[in-house]
C-alpha cells in the first residue's frame, strides 16, 4: 500500500530503523531518535544504488513522489540520478562563485587588506549590499548596462546625485575585478558615464577676506572656553591637518624637539605617512597642551575629542 501523510506523521521506530515503502523504490526511513528521511533505491549499470531526497516533513510526501518521478525519468534516459544530482550541486556552487555578490565580497575583502579606513569600508559595503541589492543574486555575465542604470536611477531619483555617482564608481570596481578574473569581458557600467545627472554644487562657507580671517584668529585667541579647545583651534590654523587627524593625535607622533609631527598612514586619507613641520608657534601650542594632558597616550582627552570637528 502506498503511504499517506497521516501514516508518515505517526510512524515511529522503537529500537531500530524501519523502512516504509511508497512503491517504485521510494522509502521513508524512520529512526529511533525520531528523524525521518526519504530515500530512493534503484539499479543503474547493473549496480544497486540509493539516494536521499531530504527529511520529512520538510520534504512532503508529494514532493518526494515528484523527486521519484524525476529520478525514474533519468533512469529511462540511461542516466544515474545520483550522478546527475552531484553535477547539479557542483554547477550551482560554481554559479554562486560568479554572482555579483561573490565578487562584491572579494572587492570588500581587498579594500580591507589594502588598509582602507573603516568609514570607507562601511560606505562601500552599504553600496554593494544595500543600494545594489537587486544585482547581488545575478550572474555577472548576465548583468547589462540597463540593469546597472536601473539601480543607479533609484538612488538618483531620491535626490542623492552624488551618492549615485560614487555608487557607479564602486560598482565599476567590482565589475573590473571580474574582468581581470576573466569572468566577464567588459564592465557593464562603463557605458554609463554621463548617463546620470551631475551632483548639485554646494559652495561651503569660507572666509576669503584677509581682514575677516584675522578677526577669526583673534576671536580664537580670545576664546574663554576649555583651554584644550582653544589650543586645538590654534593648531588647526598653524598646521592645516584634517580635523580628525588632530582630534585623534597621540603624543608619540609629536616631536617638539625636532619640530615635526608625523601622522601615521592608518589615520590619513591617502593612507600615506604625513609629515608636518612645526613652526615655533605650533611647538609652543603642543607644549602648552602637554602641560594640560600630561604624558598620556592621547594629545586630546576623550571628553574633548567630540568637540573638535
Image (cartoon, rainbow, N blue to C red):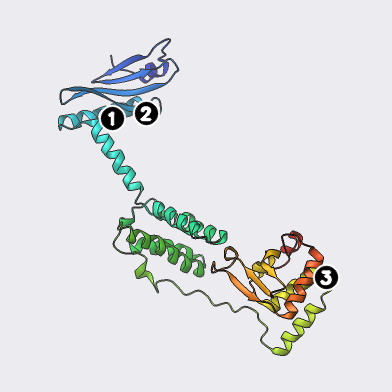
Q: Is residue 253 visible?
A: yes
Q: Earlier in the sequence, mark 3 or mark 1?
A: 1
Q: Earlier in the sequence, mark 1 or mark 2?
A: 2
The local secondary structure at tag 1 comes to helix
C-alpha span from label 3 to label 1: 77 Å
| Label 2: few (<14), some (14–19) or many (≥20) C-alpha neighbours in 10 Å | some
Residue matched to label 2: 59
The local secondary structure at tag 3 comes to loop
Residue 42, percent across and down?
22, 23
Drawn side of residue 267 relative to residue 295, left or right: left
Task: Tell me whether the residue at label 1 lies in contact with that at label 2, contact meaning CB atoms closer than 8 angstroms.
Answer: yes
At 70% from the left edge and 79% from the top edge, which residue is drawn? 238
Q: Is residue 153 visible?
A: no
The answer to whether residue 188 is above or below residue 233 is: above
Residue 10, percent across and down?
42, 15
The image quarter containing residue 244 is bottom right
The residue at the far top in this view is 15
At 66% from the left edge and 86% from the top edge, which residue is drawn? 208
Front residue of 47/126: it is: 47
Q: Tag on residue 67? A: 1
Drawn side of residue 192 relative to residue 125, left or right: left
The local secondary structure at tag 2 comes to loop
Task: Tell me whether the residue at label 3 lies in contact with that at label 1, contact meaning CB atoms closer than 8 angstroms.
Answer: no
Amino acid at each position: 500500500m502506498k503511504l499517506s501523510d497521516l501514516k508518515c506523521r505517526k510512524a515511529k521506530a522503537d529500537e531500530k530503523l524501519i523502512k516504509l515503502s511508497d512503491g517504485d523504490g521510494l522509502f521513508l526511513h524512520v529512526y529511533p531518535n525520531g528523524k525521518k528521511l526519504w530515500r530512493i533505491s534503484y539499479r543503474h549499470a547493473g549496480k544497486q544504488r540509493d539516494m536521499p531526497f531530504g527529511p520529512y516533513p520538510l520534504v512532503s510526501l508529494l514532493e518526494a513522489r515528484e523527486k521519484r518521478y524525476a529520478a525514474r525519468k533519468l533512469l529511462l534516459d540511461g542516466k544515474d540520478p545520483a550522478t546527475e544530482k552531484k553535477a547539479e550541486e557542483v554547477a550551482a556552487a560554481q554559479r554562486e562563485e560568479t554572482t555579483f555578490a561573490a565578487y562584491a565580497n572579494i572587492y570588500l575583502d581587498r579594500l580591507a587588506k589594502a588598509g582602507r579606513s573603516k568609514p570607507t569600508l562601511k560606505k562601500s559595503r552599504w553600496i554593494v549590499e544595500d543600494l545594489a541589492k537587486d544585482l547581488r543574486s545575478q550572474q555577472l555575465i548576465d548583468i547589462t548596462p540597463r540593469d546597472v542604470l536601473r539601480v543607479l536611477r533609484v538612488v538618483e531619483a531620491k535626490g542623492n546625485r552624488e551618492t549615485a555617482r560614487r555608487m557607479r564608481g564602486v560598482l565599476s570596481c567590482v565589475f573590473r575585478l571580474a574582468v581581470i578574473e576573466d569572468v566577464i569581458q567588459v564592465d557593464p557600467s562603463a557605458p554609463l558615464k554621463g548617463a546620470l545627472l551631475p551632483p548639485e554644487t554646494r559652495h561651503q562657507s569660507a572666509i576669503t577676506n584677509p581682514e575677516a580671517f584675522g578677526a577669526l584668529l583673534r576671536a580664537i585667541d580670545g576664546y574663554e572656553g576649555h583651554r584644550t579647545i582653544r589650543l586645538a583651534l590654534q593648531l588647526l590654523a598653524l598646521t592645516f591637518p584634517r580635523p580628525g587627524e588632530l582630534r585623534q593625535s597621540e603624543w608619540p607622533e609629536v616631536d617638539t624637539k625636532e619640530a615635526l609631527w608625523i601622522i601615521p598612514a592608518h589615520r590619513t586619507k591617502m593612507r600615506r605617512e604625513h609629515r608636518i613641520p612645526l613652526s615655533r608657534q605650533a611647538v609652543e601650542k603642543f607644549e602648552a597642551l602637554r602641560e594640560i594632558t600630561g604624558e598620556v597616550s592621547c594629545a586630546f582627552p576623550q571628553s574633548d575629542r567630540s568637540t573638535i570637528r
